[in-house]
Image (tube, grey):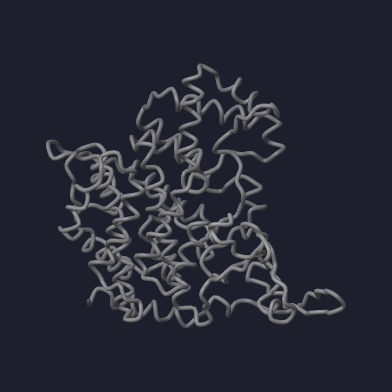
Amino acid sequence: MKIFGKIKNMSTDLKEKQPNESVNINNKATLEYQGQKLELPVVTGTENEQAIDISKLRAETGLITLDNGYVNTGSCQSAITFIDGEKGILRYRGIDIEELAERSNFVEVAYLLIYGKLPSKEELEQFSTGLTNHSLLHEDMIHFFAGYPSTAHPMAILSSMTGSLAAYYNDNPQEQTEESLNLDLIRLLSKLRTIACFSYKKSIGQPLIYPNNKLSYCSNIMSMMFAVPTEEYYIDDEIVKVMNQLLILHADHEQNCSTSTVRMVQSSGASIYACMSAGISALWGPLHGGANQAVLEMLKQIHDSGMNYKDFLKEVKDKKSKIRLMGFGHRVYKNFDPRAKILRKACDRVLDKLGVSDPLLEIAKGLEEEALKDPYFVERKLYPNVDFYSGIIYSALGIPVDMFTVMFALGRLPGWLAHWKEQYNFDKKKICRPRQVYTGASLNPYIPLRDR
């Protein structure tokens, strides 16, 4: 298709620069075991991150490393996103997240992540046009929604429908061309928002609202979710800007659970649709994408119990209590989550704009204010994170709790696609196959059934 000419050329340019080309090996670490010494290369990245390369460890010593949860293991080399948790830094392709959230929009950030640079005016127009032209689902797929019960979780529908796209488009990775790859990227970015909004309409029993080619990417999401055929739907520019920011801030976050899942599934040679479906399923876990939902459930618990937020925080600080404070602190950030700083301002704008009066939101504002001045939380660096504010904003916009993770998935999609594409183009890729330390029974004889 003519529209993908420029994108195709850019993709080829990006492919020529492999992620490992910017990594230096300028030092060595020595491992000593049973009198044997092994020198292991120390790899240094462009932001001076250092890692010991153990790729030859088993071959030369018979040993493997044990790292539960892979928290100290670098699974790949990537040129997409940089995080410094101690300093509270997040950058996409070298650009600070604060600058992107304030000056860019989601479509432009998606292009940046996937193709490695900010687009020119012409490239952005072509990319946007591609998203507009591929927003519709095959009409046969509309019938799929009728088969789901009204109680089906939107993430279940999103995951299965994403996998079903492979039945309608080329599902053979061996036949992938540069042009068909770019077309698949466009299809997924455009159609997943349609699937997400259709799944929401299905859950509340309202008619499906088709995408409108006159609307922007985020405006279309708002329209498909909240418009009804019987009346005109007004789209507020300020709300659309906040929606753009929410999606931008979730667009990528390095090697998290869902992104690592996408890369692992891709390593098997699976299609891009299967990989995205797997990523959605991984994100669905309450310890990953479900964190902002947990925030709203916590607020509801406080409200229903009749407890005020000050008493709740006292319970949180009590070591004998099992009450947890959701939406505070982060596994990666040991400082203030840079995304949370941005959403804190956006949260104030949204609440003022909408004039929302919700007891849960009042509790949230009280928790935030109290925790930020309480030495217990400040000393432990338990600051509000992105999940705390995103849940509040989604709730204020009228997005139901079970759609929170779906919105997260729409935001994270460009990052998944960028990592899929980076690994797809990597010339030294291997199928992911972690090792284990076996802790089961040693050799056991088989006992016939009559003797058991």
310 left or right, relative to 231 = right
Is 212 displayed left or right of 191 in the figure?
A: left
Report the residue at 46% width, 26% height from top: 300
Q: Please indicate whether residue 153 sits to the left or right of residue 347 in the image.
A: left
**What residue is drawn where x is 30% and y is 72%?**
171
Of all residues, the one furthest to the right in this rendering is 35
Residue 27, compared with residue 353, is above or below; it is below
Percent across and percent down for residue 70 are 62, 60
Left or right: residue 239 versus residue 167 is right
Quarter placement of the C terminus: bottom right
Residue in the foreground of this view, choosing between 262 and 328? 262
User: Which residue shows up at 70% across the image and 39% down it?
Assistant: 380
Name, please, the residue furthest toward the top.
306
For the N terminus, give its image quadrant.
Answer: bottom left
Name the image quarter holding residue 192: bottom left
Residue projecting furthest to the left: 230
Nearer-the-camera pick, 199 or 181: 199
Percent of width and height locating residue 55: 65, 77
Residue 280 x/y as whole percent: 40, 55
Q: Hey, which quadrant is residue 448 in on the image?
A: bottom right
> Across the whole image, how many numbered discs are drawn on residues?
0
